[in-house]
Image: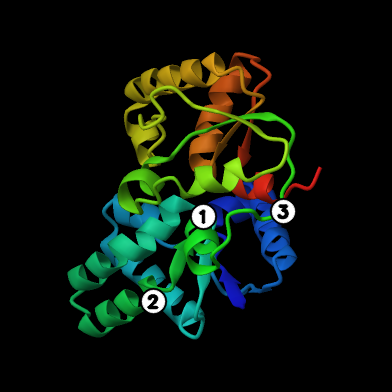
Amino acid sequence: MRVSLFITCFNDTLFPRTGQATVELLERLGHEVAFPAEQTCCGQLHFNMGYAAEAAALVRRFVRVFADEETIVCPSGSCAGMVRDAYPRVAEQAGDEALAEEVRALGSRVFELSELLVDRLGVEDVGASFPHRVTYHPTCHTLRLLRVGDRPLRLLRAVRGIDLVELGEARECCGFGGTFAVKNPDVSTAMLSDKVRHVLDTRAEVCAAADNSCLMHIGGGLERLRAGTRTLHLAEILAATE
């Protein structure tokens, strides 16, 4: 199968290893991975900050770049959620019915990584090996917007050698929330403190998630405490063959 990678600007700029791991994983499973070079930001930041016109311009660009792709994978629940949930609203606010129809059709072809693997490709054991103690944080967009359920955990449980431990109060937000952390730093820090405490309680070597934005936030808290616990994107664990 040909799969088109929507890497997201956050991953491309700060966490390129996530994109590399996604490609390695899909190619190991026998799929062709395409990368439309003209892709850019999905417009989530602009939309959340109230810049509707700027967001609409990025939505039109996304539609143009990915229009001919049948299956699109995004290793970010946040950005996948933006495309599937918010794009129709952006188009409607812009008064562009043609764009609204296009994004509704395109949205059905956009998958978060665990959705693609489990639902579209029908695989849970991806041939990974990762002999480490791992806990998993279900990010808000994957949990509440995309409703991926236990798909990431099913994939992790099939990894050879992994010691997967349950995270306490896992459904609670880590406090990042994009611009929320900037606008409400005190509340964000308090939420992060709770999340970090639960991560440390697991005594895990690695905290995994499907969004690098949340992992950046959690990882920063862990690093400041010199806890020795590292963060890894789900794709990096699934691509591992240690």
Q: Is residue 8 left or right of 78 when viewed as pictured?
A: right
Q: Which amino acid, by three-letter code, is at mark 1? A: Ser
Q: Secondary structure at mark 3?
A: loop
Foreground residue, 75 or 99?
Answer: 75
Circle 2 — which element?
Answer: helix
Per the image, the residue denoted by label 2 is 106
The local secondary structure at tag 1 comes to helix
* Other-residue count near label 1 (Cα within 10 Å), few / some / many at <14 / 14–19 / ≥20: many
| Residue 240, x across and y down, in percent | 74, 47
Height in image: 39 above or below 152? below
Q: Tell me if label 3 and label 1 are in contact, CB under 8 Å.
A: no
Q: CA distance from mark 3 to mark 2?
A: 30 Å
Where is mark 3, residue-wise?
Answer: 127
Q: Which residue is mark 1?
A: 114
Is label 3 or label 1 in front? 3
Look at the image and tell me whether residue 41 can be seen. Answer: no
Q: Quadrant of the N terminus?
A: bottom right
